[in-house]
Image: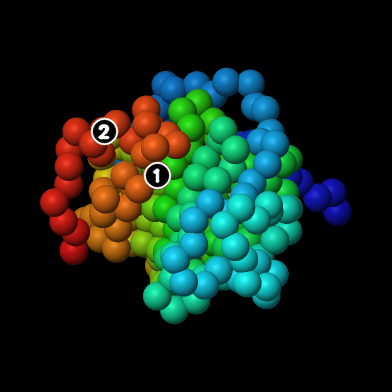
């Protein structure tokens, strides 16, 4: 069997039909935003830690350089920020598990559990694998909370997100959002159920913590100045 990278996986999914998925809310929007020629990121590093961040089981410190295949896990009451140079920045909160995939080939991570918020530079592509869906983020802000192996919450805070079945790459939904379009996803026997949801688990202030590195991508949240979440 030939092993595909994430970019090939997404291209394959675009050509498959008849996905066994149940969608209770239809928001099939396609963005005209194009992506510039893909150039892989050159480095990734830990930029901020509050509490405990373990990298491959070893306690990390700010400035630690990350490598493909690294396993990241936050402790209780902990938070960490990871920067992929000139490409994306993401935050993890307490009891979250993220794996850095072959980031220098595919710009991809796997979220196994917990709270994950990413800001992706405009016209860049970033993929996030979860137990149920593979999300292709085409700028600029994306949030996911993996509650367990059968339930997750996903918000396209701003930009375009392509959702595909994590098992076979078949198309589930493409969503374009100006400001917080969210869904609850749950595993079903014949696919995945998707229902609309309000903004919860994350707040604009979480996004603005990363605004210094990506000011253009977070401009809409500075203007809106959100006041709360469920």
Tag 2 secondary structure: helix
Q: Is residue 163 visible?
A: no
Residue 100 position within the rendered picture, expressed as x and y whole percent measured from the top left: 65, 55
Give residue 39's quadrant in the image: top right
Judged left or right of residue 60, residue 180 is: left
Residue 128 position within the rendered picture, expressed as x and y whole percent measured from the top left: 55, 51
- Rendered-image quadrant of the C terminus: bottom left
Q: Nearer the viewer, residue 160 or 214?
A: 214
Residue placed furthest toward the bottom: 76
Q: Residue at x 52, y 72 (%)?
A: 52
Q: Nearer the viewer, residue 68 or 159?
A: 68
Tag 1 secondary structure: loop
Q: Residue at x 65, y 56 (%)?
A: 64
Mark 1 crowdedness (10 Å alpha carbons): few <14, some 14-19, many ≥20? many
Q: Residue at x 84, y 49 (%)?
A: 2
- Mark carried by residue 77: none
Judged left or right of residue 145, residue 224 is: left
Q: CA distance from mark 2 to mark 1?
A: 13 Å
Q: Which residue is mark 2?
A: 220
Whichever of callouts 2 and 1 sits on the residue coming sooner in the sequence is 1
Mark 2 crowdedness (10 Å alpha carbons): few <14, some 14-19, many ≥20? some
In contact (CB < 8 Å): disc 2 and disc 1: no
Residue 174 position within the rendered picture, expressed as x and y whole percent measured from the top left: 42, 40
For residue 104, above or below residue 147: above
Q: Residue at x 73, y 53 (%)?
A: 68
For residue 163, above or below residue 193: above
Q: Indicate how the structure is coloured in the image.
A: rainbow
- Mark carried by residue 210: 1
Q: Nearer the viewer, residue 212 or 131?
A: 212
């Amino acid at each position: 069997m030939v092993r595909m990278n994430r970019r090939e996986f997404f291209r394959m999914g675009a050509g498959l039909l008849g996905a066994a998925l149940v969608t209770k809310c239809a928001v099939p929007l396609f963005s005209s935003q194009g992506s510039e020629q893909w150039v892989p990121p050159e480095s990734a590093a830990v930029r901020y830690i509050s509490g405990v961040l373990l990298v491959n089981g070893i306690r990390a410190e700010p400035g630690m350089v990350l490598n493909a295949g690294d396993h990241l896990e936050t402790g209780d009451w902990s938070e960490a920020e990871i920067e992929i140079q000139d490409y994306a920045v993401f935050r993890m909160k307490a009891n979250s598990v993220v794996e850095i995939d072959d980031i220098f080939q595919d710009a991809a991570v796997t979220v196994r559990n917990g709270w994950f918020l990413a800001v992706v530079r405009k016209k860049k592509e970033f993929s996030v694998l979860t137990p149920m869906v593979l999300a292709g983020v085409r700028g600029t802000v994306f949030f996911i909370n993996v509650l367990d192996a059968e339930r997750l919450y996903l918000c396209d805070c701003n930009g375009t997100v392509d959702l595909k079945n994590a098992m076979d790459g078949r198309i589930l939904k493409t969503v374009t959002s100006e400001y917080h379009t969210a869904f609850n996803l749950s595993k079903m026997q014949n696919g995945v159920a998707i229902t609309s949801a309000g903004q919860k688990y994350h707040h604009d202030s979480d996004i603005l913590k990363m605004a210094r590195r990506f000011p253009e991508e977070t401009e809409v949240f500075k203007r809106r100045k959100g006041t709360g979440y469920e």
